[in-house]
Image (tube, rainbow, N blue to C red):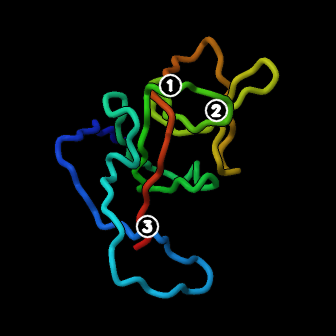
Amino acid sequence: MKIYNFSKTNKLKIPYFEGGVSAGFPSPAEDYIDNEIDLNNLLIDNPTSTYYVRVVGDSMKGAGIIDGDLLIVDRSLEIINNCIVVAHIDGEFTVKRIKKINTKMFLYAENENYPAIEINEDMKLEIFGVVTHAIHRFI
């Protein structure tokens, strides 16, 4: 897993069609751009606590996170039940959904081919942050 620091030194304003795009029947085309957005401003709430991670593997495909995706991870967010986190377990990085069941905590894959990992006091575990966005290519 590769980790990249967030840098907001360059603003990148991209044309934004505020009317949206139809995912059903086509809507009439609009000939103008409503606004511009900066993806940094849209996707990053806490710049000093944010980093990027490239996904390797398919353990989270059920959550829409696939091999090659770029995850945006925020270290400042509270870790709550059912959130998706980047964790470092016994020397390896992983992305999983955290779940509390009764008095036990688990890291769950979103792929039935991967077992849940029960968190116990014998393992070396560090949660590196909460995944806020996943960006992936279609082509």
- Identify which amino acid the numbered label 2 is placed on: Ile
Q: Is residue 107 above or below residue 28?
A: above
Mark 1 lies on residue? 127
Q: Position of residue 130 (x, y in %)?
A: 51, 34
> How many marks do you count on the picture?
3
Q: Residue at x 35, y 84 (%)?
A: 31
The crowd level at tag 2 (other Cα within 10 Å; few <14, some 14-19, many 20+) is: many
Q: Is residue 101 above or below residue 7?
A: above
Q: Residue at x 63, y 28 (%)?
A: 80
Quarter of the rendering containing residue 84: top right
In the image, which disc is placed on residue 18? 3
Secondary element type, mark 2: strand
Q: Position of residue 26 (x, y in %)?
A: 55, 86
In the image, which disc is placed on residue 98? 2
Nearer to the camera, 32 or 127 = 32
In the image, which disc is placed on residue 102? none
Quarter of the rendering containing residue 36: bottom left
Nearer to the camera, 39 or 7 = 39
Circles 2 and 1, Cβ within 8 Å, touching? The answer is yes
Q: Residue at x 41, y 65 (%)?
A: 137
Q: Is residue 94 above or below residue 22?
A: above
Quarter of the image that includes the C terminus: bottom left
- Identify which amino acid the numbered label 3 is placed on: Glu
Secondary element type, mark 1: strand
Q: Position of residue 34 (x, y in %)?
A: 36, 69
Q: Earlier in the sequence, mark 2 or mark 1?
A: 2
Q: Earlier in the sequence, mark 2 or mark 3?
A: 3
Q: Residue at x 36, y 28 (%)?
A: 49
The CA span between labels 2 and 1 is 10 Å
